[in-house]
Every structure is written in structure tokens, then in C-alpha cells.
Image: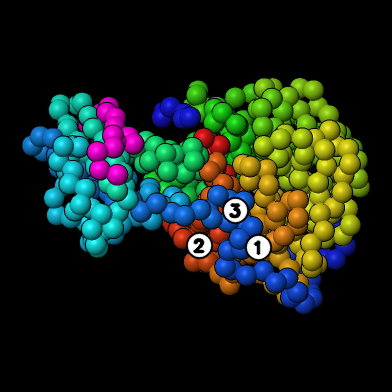
Amino acid sequence: MRTNRRNRSASYVLPAAAILFSLVAAAGGTDRLNASAAPQDWFRAGTGMGVEKARVAVADFVAGNQGSQPLGQLFTDTVRADLEYSGILDEVSKSFLPQADPGRPEGLKEADWTAAPANAQFVAYGTLTASGNTLGVDAWLSDVRTPGAPPAIGKRYPGAVTNEDVRRVAHEFADEIVMRLSGGVPGIALTRIAFTSSRSGTKEIWVMDYDGQNQTQLTHGRTIAVAPRWSPDDSRIAYTCLAGTFQICMYSMELGRTVAFAHYGGTNSSPAWSPDGTRLAFMSSGVAGSPNIYTADATAGGGLKRITVSGGPDTQPVWNRKTGQQIAFVSGRGGLPQLYMMNADGTNSEKIDLPDMGYVVDPDWSPNGQLLAFTWRRPDGNFDIYAMDIATHQLVQLTRDAGRNEKPSWAPDGRHLVFQSTRTGKWQIWTMLADGTEVRQLTTEGDNESPNWSPK
């Protein structure tokens, strides 16, 4: 086990168990929202993607001894892919690079890298040596427009001589580059994505690396396991499972197995962690008979507390992960499902007004607490993903004209989103930059849904 780093009718009459799944919407109307696929300035500022991009070149890593070249190429290719998808760098095309790879600082000729066509500002380079089962990568990042300045990064990364460890070390180096060049926000190359897949015959919880590699099945309940949600420290995953009725279940990443969690009456679904990891919010119909939102102790499920008292149904709570003081959620109390906001104790509940009618589900709060991503099917529209500045209610549409797009989840850097889409036919998992560009498919086998990006 790898160690951790760092969902009809206008009346919206819905059986409780159906809240568990993506709902099918219907309504009519007109298109009034002036939301462009192009990124607005306020949105770029809110995601940290509006700054000037540093131009970075990645030289081929030099083999430190005979036989190390294939691993060196894997390392180089992984770093390049990570930086290309970072959203904050302008990576120099491989075809523009000088022929000589420096390997070490004394071999770096700055003028070769600052000249056209490379026109680089920073160069990442180094040497990879594999000896027996011991891997050593000496890696540097130098500002070639400031000759004589010490490298911004100069570090040895140890590991084992396996493709998996080479990728891990490459992710570490790429993340450090991103952190140094993005004002201290860590990269996401070592993060993971939890999701639901049916490829094994039943819906189970799986995890994969942020780029879709190393897809691994976690649960083996052979019933239904959906809606995984990472704990803030990445040590556990809460999810919804079918155990007689739908219940909140828990998987320990440290123990590699499911662990005990309280079962409640009725239908229970849509778990969400408080930012400090001590509480879970979720939908339950077991106490009041109608689906409302409750919180409970995250360790074993004790201390059950009801925090919404509407006729509901209320579901899909999500804590503001920056402040921990607000919860956004979905409610059908006014008809079709819409977004609502309340204090974390359930007080001051109010509807979040949108400029058009429709069907709104799947809220997820950005790491900085400023933006809310959600799925919105507007009248005569498709299921698409939008983001809102919660203070000003400004909106941007992130997906358009490409199948159904649902269940957005923010990456911890606030610059990427993962979501599910039918744009290629079946439900698959995709990622994109937070402005809706650079869309990439991560899964291909079976039906894959409900992605959730790890917090670190």
C-alpha cells in the first residue's frame, strides 16, 4: 500500500433511495445566462490561473550508469507530463530543446536555453542512476536568465528501481517545481482520485493516480459502493454502501480494509467530511422519515445531530473546506433540486439564487472557499458543470456540448477539476483545468462515476 502524502417531475417527488444516484431532470425554458466557455478574469484570479506563466524547459535526464537510460526517459517523460498539466507553466516543446543535456549544474550552458527557439526562463535537468535495487535521482531547477545564481532546486531523490518508484520520484520533483513557481501552492502530481467503477461486475470503490495511472480496486463488497469522499488527511474514504439499506461505510487506507462505522435506520448517503476531519455530514431518512442532513462523529458515527428540518429532501452536503463554517447542499423543498447554503450548525439556511431555472446538484467547494462548482441542467439544456463565486454569484460554464457532465470535484491546488462525463458514450472519469480547458480522459474500462480528488 502506497503511503499517503502529504440526480422528472416539476413537483420533485423522489423516493429516498433514489437520492443516492444522479437524478434525471426535466424542465423547459430559455437560455439567459451569459456564461462563456472562455475564462473570465474574476475566475482566473479565484483559481490562481491568471498570473504570468514561467517558461520552463525539461532536459532529458542523463543516465548515470549503463542500463539506466530507459528509467531516465520514464522519469523525464513523467516530469514533462506533470508540468504540462500544471496550469501555471509554459512548457517548452521538446523539439525546441538544445541537443546537449546538462546532467549537472556545471554542464548547463545558459545561453543555449535562453536563445530561440527554446527561450526558456527555467531549466529542469539532472542525472538518474540505478544500481541494483537502489535508485538515485539528482535533480536541479535553474533560472537560466540569471547566470551565476544558485539553482532554485538542487536535491537528491532516492527510490527503488521500479517503474512505479521512478514515477513517484518524478512526481515529487514536478510538484516541487510547481510549488516554487506558483507562490507556494503544492503541485498535485502525487494526489489520487477515488471513484466508483462497475468493471469488476458490481459497483465498487477504486482509486487511481491523478493522471489515471495505477487504477486499483479497494472495496470488494459485491453489492453497491458509491460516492467516495476522502478524509482531509487522506487516511480514510467514506462512501455509501448497500448493506440491507443504504448506509455510510468507511475504508481505511492505512489498514487496507473497511472499518466499522455506525449504521442508521432508513436510507443514508452522500457523506462529506468537515475540514478538521472530526465530523461527517450526510443525508439520512432514518430519524425523521424524510431525507434531511445530519452530522455525526467521523470516528465511529456517534453523536448524531440533525441540522436541516425542512420537508426536504435535503442531500449532498459539502463543507466550506477553508472556513469550516458553512455547508452548501441540495434541497428539493421548493420543487426541483436547487443549491442552498447554511451555517455548519444548520442555522441561517438560504437558497443560492441562479439567473435561470433548472436542476442543480453536486456542489463542491474550492480549496480557497471562494468558488462553488456544481452540475446544472438549465431549461432546454444539458447537464453541464458550472462554477460560482460565492460572494458575488458570478458564474462561468466549464463544460458545453459534450454529453452529460456531472459530479465535479476540486483538486487541492484549486486549478483542476475531476468529473464524470458520457461524452464518449459510457460514464467515464475526466479531468480539466479549472477554466474548462485541457480536458483529459482517465478511465476507459467499464462505467466509472462519482470521482473525488484527494485533499493532498
Q: Amino acid at mark 3?
A: Ala
Residue 47 sits above or below residue 116 on the image = above
Cα–Cα span, label 2 and label 1: 13 Å
Q: Position of residue 34 (x, y in %)?
A: 70, 72
275 w.r.t. 92: above or below: above
Q: Is residue 286 magenta?
A: no
Q: Residue at x 60, y 53 (%)?
A: 45
**Residue 390: image location, x then y, percent:** 74, 51
Residue shown at 46% from the left, 30% from the top: 5
User: SS for tag 3?
Assistant: helix
**At which x and y percent is residue 374?**
68, 55
Report the mark closest to the observer, 1 or 3. 3
Q: CA distance from mark 1 to mark 3?
A: 13 Å
Instruction: Find the magenta span and give its range.
Output: 146-164
Label whose residue precedes the other's in the sequence (2 or 1): 1
Do the residues bearing badges 3 and 2 touch, measured as CB atoms within 8 Å? no
Amino acid on which the number 1 mark rests in the picture: Val
Task: Assess disc 1: are there few (<14), some (14-19) or many (≥20) residues with their C-alpha within 10 Å of its C-alpha.
Answer: many
- At 78% from the left and 53% from the top, the residue drawn is 339
The circle drawn on residue 437 is 2
Check disc 3 and report the residue beneath it.
45
The label shown at residue 91 is: none
- Disc 1 or 3, which lies upstream in sequence? 3
Check disc 1 and report the residue beneath it. 396
Mark 3 Cα-neighbour bin, 10 Å: few <14, some 14–19, many ≥20: few
On-image quarter of the N terminus: top left
Q: Single out the residue that lies furthest toward the left.
A: 66
Question: Is residue 294 found left or right of 300 in the rendered image?
Answer: right
Q: Nearer the viewer, residue 409 or 147?
A: 147
Foreground residue, 144 or 163? 144
**Residue 384 higher or lower than 71, as above or below:** below
